[in-house]
Amino acid sequence: MYNENIFHYLRTNKLPHIWCPGCAHGIITASILRGIDKLKLDKNKTSVISGIGCSGRTPGYLDMNTLHTTHGRSLTFATGIKFANPKLTVIDVMGDGDALAIGGNHFIHACRRNIDITAIIFNNNIYGMTGGQYSPTTPVNAYASTAPYGNVEPPFDIVKLATGAGATFVARGDAFHVALMDKIIEQAISHKGFSVVEIMATCPTQFGRRNKMKEPYQMLDFVANMAVSIKKWNEISEEEKEGKFPVGVFVDETRSEYCESYEENILKKVQRGEK
Amino acid sequence: MMRAEIRLSGNGGQGIILAAKVLAEAAGIYANLNVVQSQIYGAAARGELSKADIIIDDGDIYTLEISSADILLCLSQEAYDAHHKEIKPTGIIIIDDFYVQKFDPLDKRILSFSISQMSKDLAGSEMFTNLISVGILTIVGGYFSEENALKAVEKNVPKNFLEMNIKAVNMGFEVAKKKVKQNC
Amino acid sequence: MTKIELLSGNDAVVKAAITAGCKFYGGYPITPSSEIAEGMAKELPQVNGKFIQMEDEIAGIGASIGASLTGAKAMTATSGPGFSLKQEHIGYAIMGEIPLVIVNVMRGGPSTGMPTYPAQSDVMQARWGTHGDHELIVLTPCSVQEIFKLTIEAFNLSEKYRVPVILLTDEIIAHMREKVEIEARSEYKIIDRAKPTVEPENYNPFDTKHGMVPPLAPYGEGYRFHITGLTHDHTGFPTSNPDLVEKLQERLRDKILDNKKYFNWYEERMVDDADIVVVAYGATARSAMRAIKDARLNNIKAGLYRPITMWPFGYENIKKIAKTAKMILVVEMNLGQVKGEVERAVAGTKCKVKFLGKANGELITPAEIGTKIMEVMNV
């Protein structure tokens, strides 16, 4: 997996990064960069945007047009950037709280609009930076600093949510199965339309510590064991599915992309003098 | 110094807002007077009571609202009931004789016209009620010329309805001139 | 060639924004500002610009900030409740020094309040609505003609000082139609943001080597840089170093206050010999203009001070008036917002401050102001 080329896309003077030992955010970031490298994207024409939280620090390390926005609202900025300059490749990295709690509304509408942005959700099932509070993806019964007796809220299924909201590319990977992650992130970036990639990530510091997985390898084991390929998922029983998630590409379809649609149906119409 | 306050009232859908805009442009742009035109918004725009005001002045306009009008147009009974007291002692109330039947018969300020009937005669519907009113108000007010009014109509109505609208305004001019003559 | 058009205040915002070179509108519908969104949806495609109706108020301003970073002049418009929602991102634009114009058509509040009735109750929200110490520019026009003029100025100031500029109108002047004189675009002074002159590798988005307002490069043209809402150093990367943070905070303040003389706009009428000066802005100022004329007819020496630039506030302008006038009467469609600022301005002088305010959805009439003038002057 090691790829020397990714240093070309890094602000190496900003390293080392702030993420804890055992955090998967660095693994995911490297995967994104391998995708960017494989697609030979021009870093002058690539914009990476984030919200607030541990995932929010990602753009700072990337030598591109980068923006660290407000909590949950990164997709609104990303939409403005992409729509105002469709020539830019726009990647939006978000945490689970970012994308699905405070930013849930922006997330479903970006899916519906099908604007050509790649949304990568670093799902570590917890609010890491603020101290381990439960998030919309914290499993039932898991412990969090605001769930000292165990979490009673059912979590979102990001894949189903994005699919239902109309995203035209939806995939899930995990920080352990790196080859698969590389493949789906690359596919997601090259997809025309709104792409959602959920990466099941690890937070030994805030999630693991409270849930008997304080060692980094335990948490990586945890996500690795949760991940089941789509093919296998369709063969196993409902009991076997308990506590597990299918990984792979769930949606990959073509639908009119927002910027192109505006260009074709509004700007060109006006240029031709039609109403 | 001249200041005139005109209030148009009726029910939503009678085209009050367009009529107000035409009158305001006739005064403001074509007769080069100062003008402030406003209307009430909200539920009124969806079928209830509708109201639009035009203030015309040859100097600067500082008072942005009408307290008592010089001319009041009432195209519905509800409009008359709501507004007939907001008028100067010397003012003129123009009513549609089909829709406004309950009014003070002793009020000498009332001028009654068959506006909606005239529209039906012209086009088989009431859709020109507002433009006939523009014609009547132009003559009754006398703040700007018939030509000013016609220019404003031309600017504000769709091309394919222009001929009918011009006819409607002219009908308003004629009927108002007759009535004003009678009253003299 | 001068063109005369009958426009509503909201229409005038649209025409002026296009004249100023606005190329992006992100917003969400809200009464009584929606005509601005509708107008921009129609007009922007005519100039190859982009209009997007976002999922909420926060998203509307977020998209506009994003667009501005690509180099597009961008705006959004809203009213009371929507303005509340936009506050977080107004702060972001201040911190990131991202040009943006926000129009807030004031309506009655708090909360949903009176959507179709006027108020002037967001003067303080415009100033202090977003958290943290900050300066920004707020303009308060009083006629449709002035809305046209100040919309262009709002874009100019925003581009020049890399700061969000708020155009604060009210339901009355937003919805009423008046005559507006419009010149050819070439007749207006249009300011575009300064672009960097250094090589991309030497570019820093907050570098003050050549002045308090550093040039802002657009995304996508080779200047790869970082912007964050966190306190940051000249490179744009986060810092919590107290010295650097202090430098940043002070510069964000001083770039506005030190340049205030270039946009300290106000109008005075018959102030020189006035015993009583009415302070009023927006639609209320129109009533005040009538009231002071009527007062003069009654042998009361009345004058008017009308702030056009509301923030930064013209304390020194008021202070000057307080040296000669016996009394200042603040009139506004709220329960006392500018009043407090006037009191601060006159502190230490003999000038008394009186107040006439109302927040019931009605415009304050010339007669009401006239009566109040008589009352406070003991006539």
Image: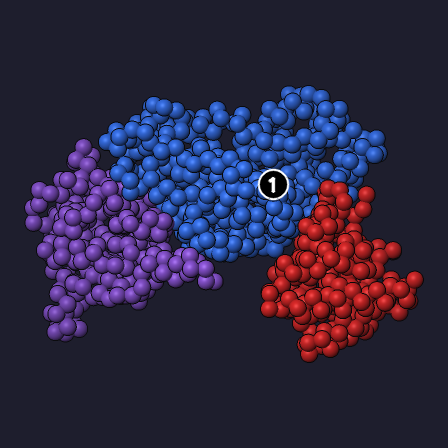
Around disc 1, counting alpha carbons within 10 Å, would you say few (fewer than 14), some (14 to 19), or many (20 or more)?
Answer: some
Can residue A23 be seen by looking at this rendering? no
Q: What chain letter is assigned to the residue under label 1?
A: C
The foreground one among C192 and C225 is C192
Q: Which chain is red in the picture?
A: B
Residue C321, picture quadrant: top right
- Per the rendering, the colour in which chain A appears is purple
Give the amino acid type for the residue marked by disc 1 in the picture. Glu
Callout 1 secondary element: helix
Using residue B99 as the reference point, say whether residue C261 is left or right of it.
Answer: left
Q: Which residue is mark 1?
A: C146
Which x, y percent locates residue A239? 16, 72
- Residue visible at 40% across and 29% down in the picture: C213
Task: State whether residue A184 appears in this view.
Answer: yes
Q: Is residue B112 above or below residue B58?
A: below
Q: Position of residue A69 (x, y in %)?
A: 33, 44
| Furthest residue toward left | A2
Find residue A208 and report its horizontal and vertical position in percent: 18, 50
**A252 to the left or right of A222:** right
Which one is nearer the viewer's eye here, A97 or A106? Answer: A106
Q: Which chain is blue?
A: C
